[in-house]
Amino acid sequence: MVVLGIDIGGAQIKAGMVDDQGAIIASRTIATPPDLDSFVPSLHDAVRWLLEATALPAGVGIGCKGIINPDSTQVEALTGSLHYLEGLRLSELLGLPRDVPVFADNDARVALAGEMVWGAAQRLDNVLMLILGMGVGGAAVVNGQILRGHTGVAGHLGHLTVEPEGAVCVCGNRGCLETVFSARAIEGEAWAAVHRGCASTLTRLFREQPQLATCRTVFQAASEGDDLAAAIISKATRRLGAALAGLLHIFDPELVILGGQVADAGADLLIPLQEEVWSRSRGLLGRDVPLVEQQVADKSGIVGAAGLVMAPRS
């Protein structure tokens, strides 16, 4: 059996046939078209190529940013370059026979679906996942089902308020988690130190080689003993830990999964974050909830999207 996984991103659309072991057996990547008139034929061409290379899929999973109705696959809200998909049913844009089941959801839930089928969340009923990238995405499995809520907004954990008078978030709120812990927030703290005239290896690197001014660079500098970088990472990690401890008290999960580019820091993030979370939560929970890295390592989003077809649902 094969299923078709599709990741619709602002720059690229990635599609692939995935077998029941989570392996991609054929894939196709195209540039995301600028408008609907070119989007539909481009997607049709990619799907047709995959069908010719393999076979008709048992089902289709689609991951896309925004708020998506998983039952109808309708895009309820989507800003940015893909705004032209708003109000449309993704299932109707594929050019496949109507009897092929199609499932769609946002990219964070898609990542969690992949973990439920092939990764760290297998056979678990209550799991939290945070996608730590330029923003913070989130998703939750509650009693064996992906939590979506009344209007599909449940799981947007990056918009938990952690600083009531903090920076304005893209959502319009102030002090959301992603304004204090994300790749963008960590890089912003480093640039602020540059503008304050702080002297360190990190600020010199940011000034002299701005192409290397990334979150990864800040983590690396911290691990190499740069005091300023270490202070930036420590402050951000404490904030994330405090927010995550609160989420543990709300969801009482068996496991927390971390994904995204910031989580690629590995033990440099995971160990201090675990200590912060556990110190704030074990008193009431009476246990230390494991924090682990994402196991489905496919960065394309194809495998996670395919997981939507196979993940348990009510």
Image (tube, rainbow, N blue to C red):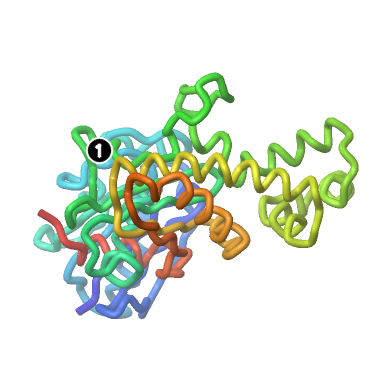
Q: Quadrant of the C terminus?
A: bottom left
134 horizontally vs 222: left or right: left
Dot 1: element: loop
What is the x, y in percent for residue 245?
42, 44
Residue nearest the observer in this picture, 119 or 44: 119
Residue at 20% x, 73% y is 56
237 horizontally vs 123: left or right: right
The residue under label 1 is 152
What is the x, y in percent for residue 146?
23, 51
Residue at 47% x, 58% y is 259
The residue carrying pointer 1 sits among few (fewer than 14), some (14 to 19) or many (20 or more) residues within 10 Å by Cα, namely some
Residue at 27% x, 42% y is 68
Q: Is residue 34 in view from this perspective? A: yes
Residue nearest the observer in this picture, 310 or 205: 205
Residue nearest the observer in this picture, 196 or 1: 196
What is the x, y in percent for residue 20?
25, 78
Identity, as a three-letter code, of the amino acid under mark 1: Gly
User: 250 above or below 22?
Assistant: above
Residue at 23% x, 42% y is 148
User: 191 above or below 93?
Assistant: above
